[in-house]
Image (cartoon, coloured by chain):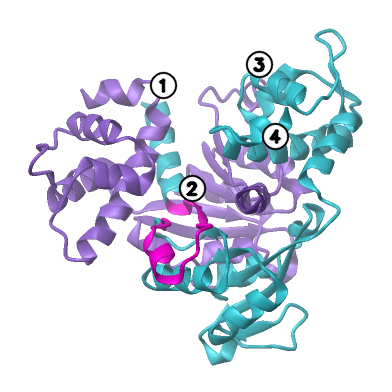
Chain colours: A purple, B cyan
Amino acid sequence: MLHNKMNQAGDKKFILRLSKYKRVLQQFKALGMERVFSNNLGDAIDVTPTTVRKDFAELNIPGSKRGGYVIDEVLKRVNELLEQDKPKKLIVVGCGKIGTALLMYKGFEQDGLMAVAGFDIDPKKIDPNATIPIFPLEELKTFVKKNNIKVGIISVPAESASRVLDLMIEAGIRGVLNFAPVELKYTKRFIAKNDHTAGCIIHNMHISPELINLFFLVKKQEE
Amino acid sequence: MLHNKMNQAGDKKFILRLSKYKRVLQQFKALGMERVFSNNLGDAIDVTPTTVRKDFAELNIPGSKRGGYVIDEVLKRVNELLEQDKPKKLIVVGCGKIGTALLMYKGFEQDGLMAVAGFDIDPKKIDPNATIPIFPLEELKTFVKKNNIKVGIISVPAESASRVLDLMIEAGIRGVLNFAPVELKYTKRFIAKNDHTAGCIIHNMHISPELINLFFLVKKQEE
């Protein structure tokens, strides 16, 4: 049943929702709660209670309208599915302020993520002996192949982002979280050039657009 | 007509789309393009061409199926609406690695944003004489009121995020971009306590959930 869901179009959001449920449930648990209702959880992550109930049915988590769901049971099932016992290794390309902050980010560990290396073109930033080493960009391909890395963060200036994406895909990266202030998109030219049939999934983080949006919503609220 | 759109439920996304159009059009322009079609733009930001055409009709931007839209005209109209001539001042609460990176982020300027101050509880981080000063958290309220700041970034550890949000709302902040790894949500308790009727709009940035999601999508693609 889960497998069906995983193959549906809504799939991308499904896994994202699971991560969000997990965060919220950990917060609820820290507050001493043992049970949760679909409407609490829906409110917290901005989805309908029906979506929560469908997702949990998909995960075979038992629950009832009156009794709600046992938080520990949900967390156990979500963790199993997210396989958070195995650390998910990723790399960071571009070790400026934001890249370095992400490379050193302590929050990754609790989420089962592990930044294993950074890459940069600036010789001053290279430090192969640091706890989390920073290598020259030329070593990206070898490192990614040797360590079988599939996911990377882009945190380079806008003008280098597209070129860096090409290098990462060529090296074997299949999922990218982009912090550069440009919209990056996977295009088929990579497949033609390198015969990679798997493609690359790119998510863009919109820091400035999100802030601009906030300014507008606030202004409108005041009108 | 625009005013109607701004009051619709889809409104939040409308302004976000405008910022995204802007980014993409600047990239297209840098590549030498002068005209753009709704399907190019729709592909680039993952919306349907119909959405692009509706948005541009809303903005009274002339265009045709055959000729597309003149990029400069669209940019001019979007900039007018986003009022990017006036810098939008914001603060950053929590000056750890990610907070400092955002405080110093050079990309804000081109987007009409300006980080004017940081706040922290750690005396070692306080530096009122820096180019972008960092003040003790106790000074938040005075600063926000004096400078009429409405938007702020939260980049504190998960366990402090909710308390910091309370302080920011009490100070007068009405829009928050949250980088702490918790789901923050505006609740009405703030209204009851401080008689703020305006509310506060909170957007959560999901760095770890987005990465976890990528790992899953990549894995599924390989199966």
The correct choice, above or below, for A6 with respect to A90 in the image is above
Residue highlighted by disc 2: A146
Secondary structure of the residue carrying numbered label 1: loop
Please tell me whether mark 1 or mark 4 is closer to you in this view. 4
Indicate the quadrant where residue B116 lies: bottom right
Amino acid tagged 2: Lys
Q: Is residue B205 magenta?
A: yes
Secondary structure of the residue carrying numbered label 4: helix
B60 and A115: which one is in front?
B60
Between the C-alphas of marks 4 and 3, the distance is 20 Å
Relative horizontal placement of residue B131, taking residue A43 as reference (left or right):
right
Callout 1–callout 2 Cβ contact below 8 Å: no
B52 and A95: which one is in front?
B52
| Image point (57%, 60%), residue name | B174
Residue highlighted by disc 3: B50
Residue A130 placed where, x, y %? 54, 73
| Image point (58%, 66%), residue name | B173
Tag 4 subunit:
B
The correct choice, above or below, for B42 with respect to A85 in the image is above
What span is colored magenta in the figure? B184-208
Residue highlighted by disc 1: A9
**Same-subunit check for callouts 2 and 4:** no
Residue highlighted by disc 4: B3
Tag 3 subunit:
B
Circle 2 packing at 10 Å, graded few (<14), some (14-19), many (20+), is few
The correct choice, above or below, for B22 with respect to B168 in the image is above
Relative horizontal placement of residue B58, taking residue A116 as reference (left or right):
right
